[in-house]
Image (tube, rainbow, N blue to C red):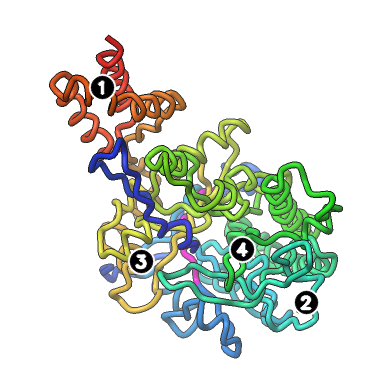
Amino acid sequence: MNYKLLFLGIVVILLGAGIFFFFSQHATTPLNTAELPLVKEESRAPTHYLAFQIFTPIPDDPTMNRNIPSLAKSTIADSVDDIIRAIGTVGGKDRKLGFIPGPLSFDHTDDQIRTLMRDSFSVALEKNIAVGFHVDDSMFWGQLSYLNKIENIEWLDWNKTPNTGRRLDWSSTPTKIMPQLCLNSPTVKAGVKKRASLIAEEVKRGMETLKAANKKHLFLGIIADWEPRIGVDFDTGKNLGYCALTNQGYSAKNPPADIDEARVDIVKEFIDFWAKSLADGGVPDKKIFSHTAFIPKVAFDLAQFGNPDKKLPGSYLEMVNFTPSRVSFGEHHYAGFSTYPQFGLLEEIRDELAKRDNPPWASTEGTAIDPAQAEKGRAGVPMETYLGNMFNHGAVLVNIFGWGVGPSSNPFRKIAESGDAVTAYRKFLRGEKLQEETPVQIPSPQFFSQGRRLQKELPVYLKEHGPEKVGVLYTTLGEQMNAQRYTDAEKTIDEILKIIAK
């Protein structure tokens, strides 16, 4: 999970006042794998999957073991049994329980990948539960020493200064792993092609086995990325990308017209390349999902608005590691996103989906609590509304992080395995309608323009006339901002501006 985005805790201070906006156990039940009678595959409606991430570190890889949680149970089969036993059903033909082993990284050997995937397909068939796989696109590659060359890792500048390491913000203390790869290096792309071919080969093999049992729907798909980006150098914090830009024909004497957008294009091309490589190997397009993470643009705009005299650290595209929401979409895959509860995130996803006639999409990582709130010991949102916000709006896959991870006190584990969460899982798998949250009020462009005008004109007015005519409205505005009722706040701003203009 990308804590750099989720732990931001940026404080917006509006109009110099004290108005703040921060964005920042299961009961054991009988094991029941029965489902509704199957129909022929070609006549079935698309299956919707509720899945749980099962982490797969490598025993002899210290970097992965330090950053990827180990299985709470001794095997994948044991973990799957634990999930099924707690929830009590694997669902029916339209809504299916699933599990997703991963990451499948470059650090895994070919034989480890084959064994992991074949064992997982066997578990799926035996226990009548759906299976998918989560690919690490470029994080863990230390076992492939041939990649550790200047032409394959990212640079800090046009002078080919190599990055010191990739930064993982997966806790409040960042960790350093091997250097970030150059996403369009010919050698890196060859490695992607080779690994995608192996994964696709095993997917086809597994799908044939499921098809022979009339259970092809038990393959839920491949998540082809794990929050790809062009990030920052660990030691210096400088933005990377100069190796990839050089491969695109740019240089210090011939830089791109917009260097941020050029790096966005490179990230998108890498996402698309992974998806196409899997599709070329035989994985159906409709079973491939991207996985990106982003700060909602509206949250960034609110931070700028609340700090008009203080420049934020970097542009919006720099803040999202050149991975805005739009790069998740592609020709050979459906879009997938990290979806922890954040103001404006789902609204931005829905806007991007609407631009493309609302295709299916996936929550490829998330749970019903914002990591920033989890670190503070706060509660999350109800799991039913968390799921309803996505499944009721076109998501065909939701992948929950946290089940069986760490001690029982781990907030992500607590919320994933809570009694309320299990009740929500059962409700979804029974085919019932899920409740969802009331839509939030997203500020319009006029909110920002009118608000900036108020920031400029109100102090002058107060100095000359005092707060008598605007004090009550100003208090109301503060309450509306604290409640994130930005549509209402815009109306109040307009009322104040009318009084000031008289």
Q: Which residue is mark 1?
A: 461
Q: Secondary structure at mark 3?
A: helix
Q: Amino acid at mark 3?
A: Phe
Q: Which residues are magenta?
A: 47-54
Residue shown at 19% from the left, 22% from the top: 470
**Location of residue 162 in the rendering, given as x and y in whole percent from the top left corner:** 72, 72
Whether 128 is drawn above or below 329: the answer is below
Disc 1 crowd rating (10 Å Cα; few below 14, some 14-19, many 20+) is some
Q: First in sequence: mark 1 or mark 4?
A: 4
Q: Which residue is mark 4?
A: 238
Name the mark nearer the viewer: 1 or 2. Answer: 1
Front-most of 431 and 332?
A: 332
Disc 3 versus disc 2: distance between alpha carbons?
35 Å
Residue shown at 40% from the left, 33% from the top: 442
Whether 454 is drawn above or below 260: the answer is above
Q: Main secondary structure of the magenta part?
A: strand
Residue shown at 48% from the left, 46% from the top: 311
Disc 1 versus disc 4: distance between alpha carbons?
43 Å
Disc 4 versus disc 3: distance between alpha carbons?
31 Å
Do callouts 1 and 3 mark residues in contact (Cβ within 8 Å)? no
Residue 50 highlighted magenta (yes or no)? yes
Q: Amino acid at mark 2?
A: Leu
Figure quadrant of residue 355? top right
Q: Is residue 222 visible?
A: no
